[in-house]
Image (tube, rainbow, N blue to C red):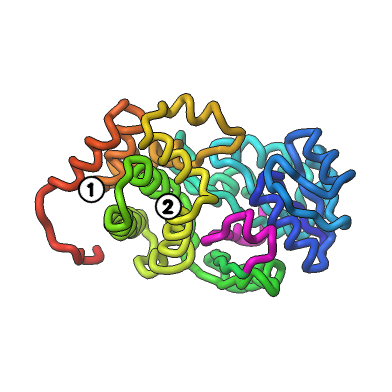
Amino acid sequence: MKVGVVGAGGWGTALAKLLAENGHQVKIWAYERETKEEINRLHTNEQFLSGVVLPPTLTASNDPAEVASEAEVLTFVVPSQWLRHTVKLFKDYLSPEVVVVNAGKGIEIQTLKTLSQVIKDELPGLHHEIVTLSGPNHSEEVGRRQPSATVVAAPDLKVAEFVQDVFISPYLRVYTNLDRLGVEIGGALKNIFSMAAGICEGLNYGDNTKAALVTRALAEMRRLGVMMGAEALTFSGLSGLGDLFVTAASRHSRNAWAGRELGKGRSLEEILASTPMVVEGVPTTKAAYTLSQKFQVELPIIEKMYQVLFENYPARQGVEDLMIRERRSEIEAIF
């Protein structure tokens, strides 16, 4: 099958490698010319997926037409705030029969739309539902063929199962889910809570603190998701609890790294300027905070993260504020 992957960051490269190893004809679109040349000449992508050798059958291009024009499946793996612009580069080269997969995570700040909704805005003529791929998948580990699991979600089970067959491999187990909205909300919000977990580490708090944070973060994720129309059970799955756990606990997570640096006292501006990677938790915090106001739902961790990131609120004081909130029951009604 002819498959295009849009985005040659770590996750895009890891997915392209997996797809090529599955026997598909894969072209990956790279924004940087030097990345394209490295993939084609050396079969590596050291800046974004260091230490991983890529299949020689995987080819890269800077030309949207070359990647998209014959693709039967096209997967977007693009930073959330750049997705709409990127989709516009490809829209004139796509067949209406192409199956489009979103493997990015985030919420568009200006519209508060999930990434599949952004793609649908720009590609209204597609004959198939857009499929979202999300889960606890660090590119460093998938790129090294370590056993992992993910979920593909779409309201049309047949197209989700088609994508499941394209991606499933001996080292990536792929499940299906009909709740695309819930899968996308979980994948987006976990980046915020991963930053919060990193802050706890930067402040030298222990495992108790992080466990409490992750548990209450899951409650907030579910609370907002249900208000937006998602299924509560989705947030107990791979794209909710699974992704939240892996990004809060792992040293691979760039969002947790940014949180640790914040906890140590570095400014957000300094942290973002020091890495070529996109820290998705930052724009997603802004979008989620706006969503909490729109839906009038209480999200205390997200509110404190917004204050820490955008209002120069002291991180340690934010933790203390959360600890002295009004007492309440742990178990909430699902509304």
Q: Which residues are magenta?
A: 125-146
Three-letter code for the amino acid on which mark 1 is drawn: Glu
Q: Position of residue 48 (x, y in %)?
A: 68, 43
Q: Is residue 71 visible?
A: yes
Q: Main secondary structure of the magenta part?
A: loop
State the residue at coordinates (24%, 45%): 300
Given this view, does label 1 or label 2 mark the residue nearer the observer? 2
Q: CA distance from mark 1 to mark 2?
A: 17 Å
State the residue at coordinates (89%, 44%): 41
Q: Are marks 1 and 2 in contact (CB under 8 Å)?
A: no
Three-letter code for the amino acid on which mark 2 is drawn: Lys
State the residue at coordinates (18%, 63%): 330
**Residue named by callout 2:** 190
- Image check: 83 left or right of 47? left
State the residue at coordinates (37%, 46%): 201
What mark, if any, has residue 298 been given in the picture?
A: 1
Secondary structure of the residue carrying numbered label 1:
loop
Q: Residues within 10 Å of mark 1 (few under 14, many from 20)?
A: some
